[in-house]
Image (spheres, grey):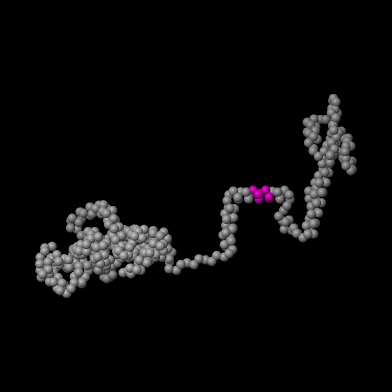
């Protein structure tokens, strides 16, 4: 994705106070970081706030980036992941309250995911159907545990290799692969159950 | 997961090769063993199918579109600069400012700002009021100013006219005062003799103040039944002194 020398030059220009270089970095990475935040946090509003926080932190700590220690995208993703973990911890209480509110319906074998899915056989438009499928997968992704979710997102949505993911998550590569596979399998089971109930 | 050995591969080995198998990086021999284990081990086969399905679901997931304002907000919150370049590709050209507008902005604006202050406006108003009152008293009319000629001969003419006017005015005033003084003297002379020694009265020459005479007149009116003798006193006079005893009308000429 990135040429190490080009990015290193951009970072040096940013540190020297070149606003255009910083703008170039923001333009290059905002989409990637926003998607990572959106898939992990689940909400567009939270994703926007988190993306801004990521760039603010990047801007303040840009001088600490050492291109000899790793790719810039790995450094950026590590910052993003740390903020996502903080956000997850902060909002844990809110999620517990929400889950208590919905606990009754879940225990009655309700269909938490299928409730969010409109009738898939109804819309003839392929694009509409595609969007609905995306929303369903996104909702299922949010049901995964944070460890599995982040591993799956980094691998399948951010296209990072196992070594980079291991660096970001600070776990061995074997653990990364195991989490990715468990996450994919869990996601497939959730979606399979959902569609079986809908169909 | 049970740790069985099928086709020379244990389930934990199958688990570790799962990612590589899906990524397509296994060697041909390792892939054959992997696939053979997946077929023979029900649990591993089901796991492989689920992992593959999950990866395919995620592969179809569309990329989320960030809000249009995201980059602008990020730049504003980091550098504090709200770059107009992001909002419009073509920057708007600044209108050209002429030198007159520069002068106006540099000089007139501060002066106008000072003039608009209430303190200055009040002072200016008072000065204008005083000037207009002064001109009105002096008899200067704005309509006359339009007809003023600034030629040297006209200026000389105006100067002599003004001088003659002032002289006439002074003469008129002097005549009026003399007539009034004469009348006062006549009034004093026709006053009846009072019992007792009469106080010597001083003749006033060139008396320009009428106050003592006015006081005497007021005293006369308080004793209205006294006789008024029709005799005139020949007091100090200038020129023709045969003035009648009756009223004298004078006309002031100020112009």
Residue A103, compared with residue B66, is above or below; it is above
Question: Main SS type for the magenta part?
Answer: helix
Side of B93 relative to A16 (left or right): right
Furthest residue in direction bottom, as rendered = B28
Q: Residue at x 57, y 54 (%)?
A: B113
Residue at horizontal 80 percent and vertical 59 percent from the top: B153
Find the residue positioned furthest to the top.
Answer: B196
> Based on the displayed image, in which of its 4 quarters is residue B62 positioned?
bottom left
Residue A44 image offset from top left, x and y in percent? 31, 60
Direction front: furthest residue? A68
In depth, the one of B45 and B202 nearer the eye is B45
Rendered location of residue A74, percent (x, y): 29, 64
Q: Is residue A124 left or right of residue B188?
A: left
Quarter of the image with the C terminus of chain A is: bottom left
The residue lying at 29 percent from left, 55 percent from top is A86
- Which stretch did the figure color magenta? B126-132
Answer whether residue A122 is visible to the viewer in this image.
no
**Place of residue B126 in the rendered image (x, y in percent of width and height, measured from the top left):** 64, 48
Q: Quadrant of residue A158?
A: bottom left
Does the magenta segment cover residue B95?
no
Q: Is residue B46 above or below residue B255?
A: below
Indicate left or right for A104 with B225 as reference. Answer: left
On screen, residue B206 versus residue B84, left or right, reads: right
**How far from the left and from the top, in percent, is residue B154?**
78, 58
| Front one among B255 and A87 | A87
Residue B176 or B71: which is nearer the viewer? Answer: B71
> In which quadrant will I find the N terminus of chain A?
bottom left
* Quarter-of-image position of residue B173: top right
Res B123 seen here: yes
Total numbered labels: 0
């Amino acid at each position: 994705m990135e040429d190490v020398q080009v990015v290193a030059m951009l970072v040096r220009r940013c540190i020297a106070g070149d606003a255009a270089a910083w703008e170039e970095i923001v333009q290059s990475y905002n989409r990637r970081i926003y998607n990572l935040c959106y898939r992990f946090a689940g909400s567009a509003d939270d994703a926007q706030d988190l993306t801004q926080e990521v760039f603010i932190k990047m801007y303040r700590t840009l001088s600490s980036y050492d291109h000899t220690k790793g790719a810039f995208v790995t450094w950026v993703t590590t910052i993003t992941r740390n903020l996502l973990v903080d956000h997850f911890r902060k909002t844990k209480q809110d999620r517990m309250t929400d889950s208590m509110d919905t606990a009754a319906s879940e225990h009655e074998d309700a269909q938490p995911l299928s409730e969010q899915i409109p009738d898939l056989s109804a819309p003839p438009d392929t694009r509409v159907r595609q969007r609905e499928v995306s929303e369903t997968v996104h909702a299922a992704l949010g049901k995964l545990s944070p460890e599995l979710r982040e591993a799956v997102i980094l691998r399948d949505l951010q296209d990072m290799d196992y070594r980079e993911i291991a660096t970001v998550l600070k776990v061995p590569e074997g653990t990364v692969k195991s989490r990715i596979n468990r996450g994919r399998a869990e996601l497939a089971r959730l979606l399979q159950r959902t569609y079986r109930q809908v169909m | 997961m049970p740790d069985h050995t099928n086709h020379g591969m244990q389930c934990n080995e199958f688990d570790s090769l799962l990612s590589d198998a899906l990524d397509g990086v296994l060697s041909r021999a390792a892939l054959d063993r992997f696939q053979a284990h997946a077929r023979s081990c029900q649990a591993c086969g089901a796991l492989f199918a689920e992992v593959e399905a999950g990866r395919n679901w995620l592969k179809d997931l569309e990329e989320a579109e960030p809000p249009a304002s995201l980059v602008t907000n990020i730049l504003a919150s980091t550098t504090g600069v709200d770059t107009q370049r992001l909002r419009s590709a073509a920057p708007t050209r600044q209108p050209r400012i002429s030198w007159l507008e520069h002068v106006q902005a540099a000089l007139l604006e501060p002066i106008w700002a000072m003039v608009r202050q209430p303190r200055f406006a009040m002072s200016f108003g008072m000065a204008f009021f005083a000037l207009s009152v002064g001109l009105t008293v002096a008899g200067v009319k704005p309509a006359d100013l339009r007809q003023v000629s600034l030629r040297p001969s006209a200026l000389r003419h105006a100067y002599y006219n003004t001088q003659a006017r002032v002289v006439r005015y002074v003469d008129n005033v002097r005549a009026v005062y003399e007539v009034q003084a004469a009348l006062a003297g006549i009034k004093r002379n026709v006053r009846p003799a009072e019992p007792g020694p009469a106080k010597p009265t001083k003749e006033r020459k060139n008396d320009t103040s009428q106050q003592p005479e006015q006081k005497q007149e007021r005293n006369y009116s308080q004793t209205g039944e006294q006789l008024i003798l029709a005799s005139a006193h020949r007091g100090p006079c200038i020129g023709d002194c045969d003035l009648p005893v009756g009223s004298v009308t004078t006309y002031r000429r100020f112009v």
